[in-house]
Image: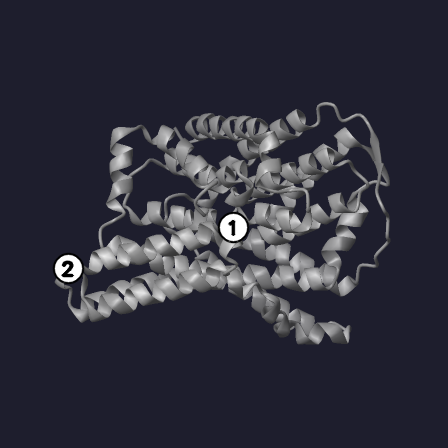
Amino acid sequence: MINTVILTLVVISFLMIIFEDLIHINKAKTTLFFGTLCWILAFIFPINQSLTSETTQQLNENLLEIATLWLFLMSAMTFVAYLNSKGFISALVQRILPETISERGLMFVIAIFAFVFSSFADNVTATLVSITVVVNLQLEVKKRLKYATLIIFAVNSGGVSLITGDVTTLMIFMENKVTIANLLILILPAFLGVLTLATLLSFKLTGEVKLAQTRIQIDKGDIIIALIFVLTISGTLLANVLFHIPPVLTFLFGLSVMFLVANMLPNKNNQDALNYIREVEYDALLFFLGVLLLVGILKEIGVLQGFTELYQYLPAITVNYLVGFMSSVIDNVPLTAALLKSGVDMKVTEWLMLTYATGVGGSILVIGSAAGIIAMSKINELNFISYLQNIFALIIAYTVGYIGVYFAANWLIG
C-alpha cells in the first residue's frame, strides 16, 4: 500500500516539473516537498517491513551523494557568480567578438563560444551571456530563432565532456561509471554535432551584422580570480586522474584560495568575496536535492528495475539513443538519477554514449533543458512551436554527435 502511495506522489511531482510553466510553481518547491514527504512516510510506514535503522541507513546513503553533488555545484557557481557580478564575463565577450561579421560567420562564432564557455561555467550563465549577444542585434525574427536554437544546443553540448559543465555528467562520473579521461573523448564528437547544426542553420544567411562595442575595463583583480577558477578546474581534473582525489575536495580548496586571495587584493570590493555565495542559484540546488530524494525512494520501493528490463530487450546503444529523446520531455536530472539507481550494467563506451544522450538530447525540444527555458524567457518569439521549425536539423546534429561518440569511444577504449 505504502509503495503505491509513494509512487503516486513521485508521479505527481514529476508531472509538476513538466508543467512548471503552466502551474507557475517552481519545480524546486515541488520536488523538495514531495521528496521529503516520501521519506517521512517511509519512516512512518516502513517499506517492505524494513527496520527504522535500515531506512535511516538508506536515507544517509542518499544524503551523502546529494551533499557531495551540492558542495561541488555550490563551489563552481560561486566562482561564476563572482565573475559575473564584476562584469568580467561581459567584458571578455566584448573583446572576443569583432565589430562587423557576416551572419554565417557569427553563427559559427556563437557556436564555438557557447560550446567552450559552457564547459567551464554553468549552463545558465553560458546561455544568458550568449543570448544577450543575439538579443542586442537587429535581426529578423526567423534568424534570431536560428541563433537561439544553436545556442541552446551548443551550451548543452559543451557541458557533457567536463564535470564542471553539466550536472548529469557529474552524476555519472560520481557513480564511477566513467573517468575524467573517458569524458574527454566526448569533446570532438559533441563539437562535431554543434558544427553540423551551425552548418544546417547557416544556409540562406547572406547578410552582415554590426556588433555594439562597449569597451568595459577589466580589473586586474578579476583576472586573478578568473585564473584561480581555471586552475581549480584543471587542477581538479589532474588531481582526480593522478591521485584519485574527489573533485569536490579540490574544488572546495580552490574556492577557499579564491576567498583568501580576494581578501588580499587592493580593491576593497573584493574583500567580501564570501558574500558571493548568496548569489548562487539555490533554487537549482534545492531542485537537485528534491529530485535525488525522489529517485532514491523509487529505488527503495523497487520501481527502477523497469529500466534494467528495457536494456534486456534492446541493445544499450539503441536505448541510450532513445533516452536522449526522453530527456527532451522528462528533466534529464531525474532521468539520469533513475538510470544510475536502477543498477543498469553497461560498458564504459555505453556509459559515455548515455552521458552524451542525456546531456544533449534535452536540446531537441525547447522545454527539455534549462538552457531552453532561459532562452524562452529572454526571446519573446521563442516558444515550443517556433522551436520546432528547426527540429529536423536538431535531430540530425544530435544523431551525428551520438554516432561520433560511438566511433570515438570504441576506437579509443574498445
Q: What residue appears at the point 22 percent right and 51 percent down from the top-left corner? A: 302
**Quarter of the image containing the C terminus?**
top left
- Callouts 1 and 2 close, C-beta under 8 Å: no
In this rendered view, identify the residue nearer to me: 219 or 137.
137
Residue 391 location (% of width, % of height): 56, 30
Q: Position of residue 12 (x, y in %)?
A: 36, 55
Instruction: Give SS at disc 1.
Output: helix
Q: Which mark is residue 237?
A: 1
Q: Nearer the viewer, residue 208 or 26?
A: 26
Q: Name the residue furthest left.
A: 49
**Mark 2 burial class by Cα count in 10 Å: few <14, some 14-19, many 20+:** few
Quadrant holding the N terminus:
bottom left
Residue 105, image quadrant: top right
Residue projecting furthest to the front: 22
Circle 2: residue type: Asn
Q: Amino acid at mark 1?
A: Leu
Q: Residues within 10 Å of mark 1 (few under 14, many from 20)?
A: many
> Of 107 and 96, which appears nearest the observer?
107
**250 or 197: nearer the viewer:** 197
Circle 2 SS class: helix
Question: Which residue bears the numbered disc 2?
Answer: 48
Above or below, 40 relative to 241? below
